Image (spheres, rainbow, N blue to C red):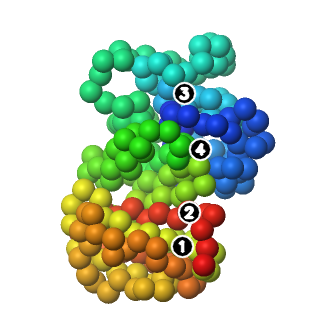
């Protein structure tokens, strides 16, 4: 499986210290994912986080309205491709990055991991989560880390690893999810419907280290806050 990593833009208050930044953002797991990535994209100021985690991106993309010019120049000299867009555009920098990964044919990516911040503007965070569930990206296995929060997009069935007692929320994205089912959770889903806006799946709990979450139709976001346990 060929995986790409996208570092999203937005404020990253922990970027000043590379060691601290990767500890806050689940350092070990993120370093493992980044080290194994076949391709790394920084969306605008996502460049700050990429460099803080020790990886020069292959591509920096966006309108460059929030990236540090000196770091952008460092990336240019480091061999990164720079694709600049006007600030007056119809897509966020994250969307541009995901579309680039999705359109790639050589190599063709099977999966993408988005790494970003859970701080900053709520509209960007919400639109970013909905974007990950877009039907356009149905061919990609998508995971995301927003600070200490892990998110997995589920379109058929996935096994999710966490500690016993960890809280988890299962949320339908963009349309009603049909045939939602689970194992390994305190409150099981048993082939039911889950509508966008429903809180039925909020604050569930792992009773086993591996939970299986699946559905027949639709798209789910499985959200785990690594700091929240029963």
Q: Quadrant of residue 73?
A: top right
Quote the CA–CA distance across marks 4 and 3: 19 Å
Mark number displayed over residue 45: 3
N-terminal of the pair, mark 2 or mark 3, is 3
The answer to whether 15 is drawn above or below residue 71 in the figure is below
In which quadrant of the rendered view does residue 50 lie? top right
Q: Nearer the viewer, residue 4 or 54?
A: 54
Cα distance between the residues tagged 2 and 1:
7 Å
* Residue 225: mark in rendering: 2
In space, the residues marked 4 and 2 are separated at their CA atoms by 24 Å
Q: Secondary structure at mark 3?
A: loop
User: Badge 1 is on which residue?
Assistant: 167
Q: Nearer the viewer, mark 4 or mark 1?
A: 1
- Which type of secondary structure does the marked residue at label 1 adopt? strand
Q: Are marks 1 and 3 in contact (CB under 8 Å)?
A: no
CB-based contact (under 8 Å), mark 4 and mark 1:
no
Query: What residue is shown at x 26% (from left), y 81% (from top)?
Result: 192
């Amino acid at each position: 499986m060929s995986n790409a990593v996208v570092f999203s833009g937005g404020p990253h208050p922990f970027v000043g210290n590379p060691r601290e930044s990767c500890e806050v953002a689940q350092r070990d797991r993120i370093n493992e994912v980044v080290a194994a990535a076949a391709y790394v994209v920084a969306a605008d100021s996502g460049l700050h986080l990429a460099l803080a985690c020790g990886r020069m991106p292959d591509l920096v993309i966006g309108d460059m309205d929030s990236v540090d010019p000196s770091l952008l120049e460092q990336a240019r000299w480091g061999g990164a491709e720079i694709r600049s867009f006007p600030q007056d555009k119809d897509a966020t920098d994250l969307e541009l990055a995901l579309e680039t990964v999705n359109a790639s044919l050589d190599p063709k990516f099977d999966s993408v991991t988005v790494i970003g911040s859970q701080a900053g503007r709520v509209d960007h965070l919400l639109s970013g989560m909905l974007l990950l569930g877009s039907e356009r990206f149905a061919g990609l296995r998508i995971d995301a880390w927003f600070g200490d929060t892990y998110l997995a997009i589920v379109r058929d069935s996935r096994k999710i690893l966490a500690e016993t007692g960890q809280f988890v929320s299962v949320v339908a994205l963009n349309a009603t999810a049909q045939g939602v089912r689970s194992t390994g959770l305190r409150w099981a889903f048993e082939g039911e419907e889950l509508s966008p806006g429903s809180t039925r799946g909020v604050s569930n709990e792992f009773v086993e280290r591996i939970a299986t979450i699946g559905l027949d139709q639709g798209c789910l976001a499985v959200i785990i806050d690594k700091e929240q346990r029963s």
